[in-house]
Amino acid sequence: MNKFIKGLAVSALAFSMSAGVALAEKTVLISGWGAQSGPLKSFGINSETILKAAVDKINADGGVKLKDGSMAKMVYEYYDSRCNAEEGIALARKTATTTNTLIAIGPTCSGVAAASFGVFQKKVDDAGDTGLQMPLFTNTAVRNGLAKISQWTFRNTPNEPDMYDKLFAWIAKTRPELKTVYGGTETDQGHSAGTYRIVIIPAAVRHGFEWSEGPIEGVTGKIGEGADNVQKASSNWLMADTSFSVQARAFKKSKADIFVISSHPFTTCGILKELARQKASPKLIVGLTSSSSAEVMKGCPKQAEGMIIPTSFAPVTPEAKAVADVAAANGASADLHSAAAWENVMIIKDVMETVGVSANGENLQADRRAIRDGLEALKTTAGLIGTVTRNQEEGEALKPYVFVHAKGGNWEVLHDPR
């Protein structure tokens, strides 16, 4: 058993209690927030569970070494931002101005990230910008380009344009009999709609798949600018929808070889069940990254059978499997979003020890700035399934990934391009 696995075993045992090793009285505080209520509540719950497990492991190993050589215990606070932009902004302001938080992790939803990142200082050292000056490191909000909003915000999320480009290239090569594509999305959710419009469908068309229309009354397909190839007949819905009869009829009428379902687990299962009821039979279904989760396997395993999704997490290394096991032991699930919380906590510890923080409230802003600068300086980080390359200018990550498919009630690796 390697050192990492042994450490996780300690973390699992210590999950709900303090480590047996006495730690110094000094503490370093990190805060987090994510959706812990509403349709995406499992994302925030899973993230907090794994974040806590990572903190427990660090403390079991002795804590965080400070600038003066002493050790500090890592502690955390976690809040429910409810996938609500106003809540996200309020939590960002509260954490940055009323707590000793050195760095925050979150949020879940891309719309919340877009709004809350906007209240941070855009450029470091801009005296005319009084925005928040506390580093924020998200593990979940995936919509492309968000970290560019502020030089205080960073992301450890997959690069969807790269993943879907490679996915459709692989499908074109391995399934040459597939020629046409049709799809739909949640129009009121920034990640699913944005990724559908500017990432997934353009990638499919770029690799030679023809858009197959299935126009019927009530299906307009208008999901925003930059979507000329899906304006005529895209079958869309809202995150709160529970009926998908009209949308499924449009899918079926398209007779496309490939169905694209760019939505989160709840509505993904809704549309899949209705497609099955109407006996729509595509040759392949491609899903959204966020639906490569346990929620889909719990909600509609039979209907999801064969669905392919690119993801930046799967238990394909001993480290990844160990984190998945710790999550499961504590009633949670490890996926591309929640597992990144583990990576974030470990990155934060390394950065704190590299730049040297004092954990003294009087030096709070200096510590925050040092951590921010340390994150920006990173060129690579250790991911659970491989090395993560970082784009310092944009605060973004380029993560290794695999293609998974739904098989027998589980997500299994179909292709590993690492």
Image (cartoon, grey):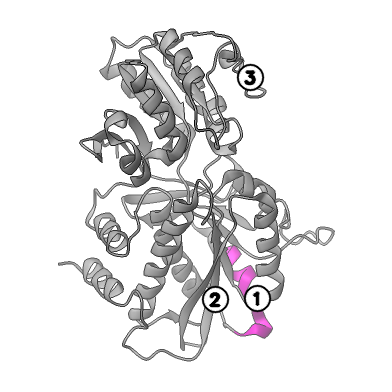
Label 2: how many Cα within 10 Å (few below 14, some 14–19, many 20+): some
User: Is 372 contained in the magenta span?
Assistant: yes
Give whichever of 103, 247 is nearer the camera: 247
Q: Which residue is mark 1?
A: 99
Residue 372 located left or right of residue 205 = right
Q: Which residue is mark 2?
A: 29
* Residue 208 visible somewhere in the drawing: no
The picture places residue 93, in percent across and down from the top left corner, at: 71, 64
Marks 2/1 in contact by CB < 8 Å: the verdict is: yes
- Dot 2: what SS? strand
Q: Residues in magenta?
A: 360-373
**Which image quarter holds the N terminus?**
bottom left
The picture places residue 101, in percent across and down from the top left corner, at: 60, 73
User: Is 219 contained in the magenta span?
Assistant: no
Give whichever of 1, 230 is nearer the camera: 230
Residue 311 located left or right of residue 363 = left
| 332 vs 306: above or below | below
Q: For residue 356, which numbered disc appears in the image?
A: none
Amino acid bearing label 1: Thr
**Which image quarter holds the C terminus?**
top left
Decide whether the magenta segment is chiefly helix, strand or loop: helix
Measured in 3D between alpha carbons, the distance from the residue under mark 3 to the one under mark 1, in whole angstroms, is 44 Å
Q: For residue 222, which numbered disc appears in the image?
A: 3
Q: Nearer the viewer, mark 3 or mark 2?
A: 3
- Dot 1: what SS? loop
